[in-house]
Image (cartoon, helix red, strand yellow):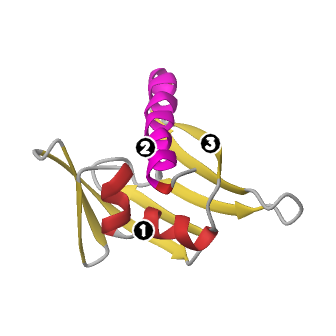
Amino acid sequence: MSDYKKVEIEFILRSSPNMLYSFLTEPSGLSEWFCDDVNIKDGVYSFVWNHDSEQQAKLLGSKENVYAKFRWLDEPEDTYFEFRIELDDITGETALIITDFCEPDDEDETILTWNKSMQNLHRVIGS
């Protein structure tokens, strides 16, 4: 097991699980909030930032409107990042739970990065 630290963050979004799922798994959705461009080939997502920086992740598993789990190809095999959608039957709120791994000293930066990404997602979905 790597020395990475597991980080889980929950965000409440005004979105249906169906609409949210498309922003978490489809290139057109991901490129609106997560990165500048996405290409998929053989289950490997190539994420492009600033039009010159690229990082690849393999889709490890997914279930429509429930979750998508990825692993960065340049990170330890026992790490991943996951988007999990949970719908509260009582309040009707949609929660997006993000699980990620980082170096122990990078936890604050990781949380800050996800918070910034969530601001972008909130803006895009009008939440």
Instruction: Work out whether residue 2 can be spotted.
Output: no
Q: Which residue is mark 2?
A: 120
Q: Amino acid at mark 2?
A: Asn
Horizontal and vertical percent for residue 96? 62, 54
Dominant secondary structure of the residues highlighted in magenta in the image: helix
Residue with the most extreme left position: 52
Taking the image as shown, residue 77 lies to the left or right of residue 6, namely: left
> Residue drawn at (28%, 69%), measured in percent from left and top?
44
Q: Which residue is mark 3?
A: 8
Residue with the most extreme front position: 126
- Cα gap from disc 2 to disc 1, whole angstroms: 16 Å
Q: Amino acid at mark 3?
A: Glu
> Residue drawn at (46%, 35%), measured in percent from left and top?
102
Q: Nearer the viewer, mark 3 or mark 2?
A: 2
Magenta-tinted stretch: 105-124
The answer to which of marks 2 and 1 sits earlier in the sequence is 1
